[in-house]
Image (cartoon, rainbow, N blue to C red):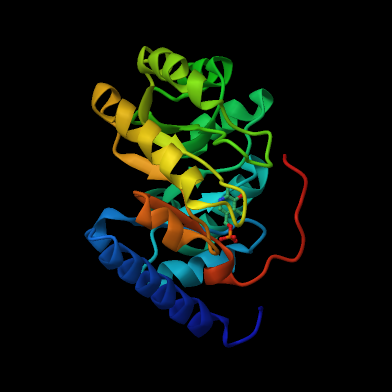
Amino acid sequence: MATGQSMWAIHDNLQAVQGRIARAAAAAGRDPRSVTLLAVSKTHLATLVEEALAAGQGAFGENYVQEAVEKMDALAGKIGEERTRALEWHLIGPLQSNKTRLAAERFDWVHSVESGKTARRLSEQRPAGMPALNVLIQVNVSGEASKSGVAPEKVLFLAKEIDTLPRLKLRGLMAIPEPGADDDRYRELKNLYEKLKSEFRFDTLSVGMSDDMEAAIAEGSTMVRIGTAIFGARKKIRSAA
Ligand SMILES: *Cc1c(COP(=O)(O)O)cnc(C)c1O
């Protein structure tokens, strides 16, 4: 990946992904602008984030708080603090309660809220000078291999609690359907989202990755999280941190 060609590769990959999003949206009778592209830069260096930024990408997803903060600081050293902060940073990986402070201080969104305890800590630790932290409840749709996420029947209870927290803004739901999951998984998620949407003023359904963005967009995704199709294969999977 780290060749002189990478800049053009990332530019071209972003265009290809935007094309896939537009075609999937059109096939579902949806406006392509109703689907936001989150570029998942986990395990990749700040230079690649900079290249994606140069190609017009402004929202980035990271899995590990510490890695993300180091990357933000490295990027700030290159393009300046102000431009780095103007980007949108989304935490999409599992969040341990000892990492909530740093997450609350440095991210704009957290997609992986799955307990009242984590939500309360994020709200308490969100700095006063910043806007409310945007959060999504991670749902474990049936048949998912991952143990992450809240069971669908428990989402309403957690949503009600988050709704009372002053420094959080509940925007919707997130899920990671198992690779190759059938369309029922996506439909189940969409139905839950639609059921809660008006009560909680949801506007974000975060679902779909490099391999399943079409299926996710067909079932209402408003935010796809794309890593491999933009930045290439990751070297190795780190354990959650
Ligand atoms: C790594 C990751 C992605 C991106 O996956 P790709 O298959 O590389 O597009 C999206 N969402 C989450 C939660 C991830 O951990």
Left or right relative to 76: residue 221:
left
For this rendering, which residue is in front, 223 or 46? Answer: 223
Residue 8, how many percent across, how many down?
A: 49, 84
* Residue at screen point 42% across, 18% down: 156
Looking at the image, is 205 positioned above or below residue 172?
A: below
Q: Is residue 209 above or below residue 14?
A: above
- Seen from the viewer's position, the closer of residues 79 and 216 is 216
The percent position of residue 5, horizontal first and vertical second, equals 57, 87
Residue 195: percent from the left, percent from the top? Answer: 32, 28
The one nearer the camera, 182 or 86, is: 182
Q: How many marks?
A: 0
* Rendering quarter of residue 44: bottom right
- Residue in the picture at 51% in, 60% down: 212
Residue 190, quarter of picture = top left
Quadrant, the N terminus: bottom right
Res. 84 visible in picture: yes
Q: Quadrant of ligand 1?
A: bottom right
**Picture layout, residue 34 above or below residue 109:** below
Q: Residue at coordinates 31% horizontally, 69% vertically from top-left?
A: 22
The picture places residue 171, in percent across and down from the top left corner, at 35, 33
